[in-house]
Amino acid sequence: DGAGQQVGIDCGETFSPVVKPATIRTVLSIALSKSWYIHQLDVKNAFLHGELKETVYMYQPLGFRDSKHPDHVYRLRKSLYGLKQAPRAWYKRFADYASSIGFSQSKCDHSLFIYKKDSHLAYLLLYVDDIILTTSSDTFRQSIISLLSSEFAMKDLGHLNYFLGITVTRHKHGLFLSQKKYAKEILSRAGMSSCKTCPT
């Protein structure tokens, strides 16, 4: 797995771009000002879509051992969860496909993909396997979702409601962003859910 990999031998760059909070706020502000629907999607098994550039071998896993050649290893063609280059390989795979259907990457934030052609305009934010999509029309949004779904296994989560630990609630004056759920999860992990509150 990833813990046994060595930089320069079976993995190189292992970073994956992370969307900036300011970019999220900007895209949400644009969508609100134009009264666009803000959609959320999830890519199933995102890291399994990545193509490996490096040569990576792995031991035969239990249940898949060749009794005639027990000392042989597998050469990986596609990425697996746990590989250090999995996030980068997935990101490149997605960026290449987004480019092929007409999106271009923002120079300010590589996790923001923009589509602009004729009257069609779309903003797509990618954070690992989470996607926020807002478009200039409902039919255009559905066509983009169809294109993405034809290439990747997608889960349609509908209207944006929870992203990067932020709960999003829509009301008549705009959006309300809250981290109450995220804070409760942190308290639960720390075993402090039943502690008394104290103003700070």
Image: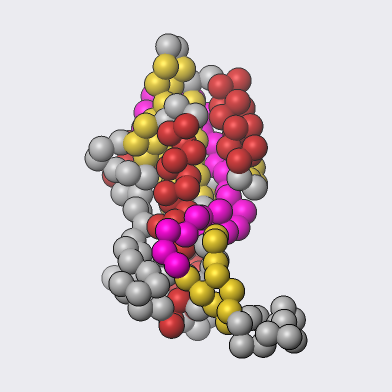
- Answer with left or right where residue 78 lies relative to residue 180: right
Question: From where the camera sits, is residue 123 visible?
Answer: no
Residue 152 lies in the magenta-colored region: no
Among the 4 quarters of the image, the one containing residue 115: top left
Q: Nearer the viewer, residue 137 or 74?
A: 74
Image color mode = secondary structure
Q: Nearer the viewer, residue 190 or 31?
A: 31
Coordinates of residue 134 in the picture (x, y in percent): 48, 31
Coordinates of residue 148 in the picture (x, y in percent): 58, 37
Which residue is rendered at x = 68% and y = 85% of the image?
A: 69
Compared to residue 85, the image places residue 44 above or below, namely above
Which residue is rendered at x = 42% and y = 49% of the image?
A: 92
Q: Nearer the viewer, residue 35 or 40?
A: 40
Q: In the picture, which quadrant includes the C terminus?
A: bottom left
Q: Tag count in the figure?
A: 0
Which residue is rendered at x = 51% and y = 50% of the image?
A: 130
Q: Nearer the viewer, residue 3 or 64?
A: 64
Residue interval drawn in magenta: 28-55
Which residue is rendered at x = 36% and y = 57% of the image?
A: 16
Coordinates of residue 102 in the picture (x, y in percent): 45, 27
In the rendered image, the residue lying farthest to the front is 68
In the rendered image, the residue lying farthest to the top is 118
Question: From where the camera sits, is residue 20 visible?
Answer: yes
Coordinates of residue 98 in the picture (x, y in percent): 46, 36
Among the 4 quarters of the image, the one containing residue 176: top left
Residue 53 lies in the magenta-colored region: yes
Compared to residue 133, the image places residue 49 above or below, namely below
- Answer with left or right where residue 111 lies relative to residue 160: left
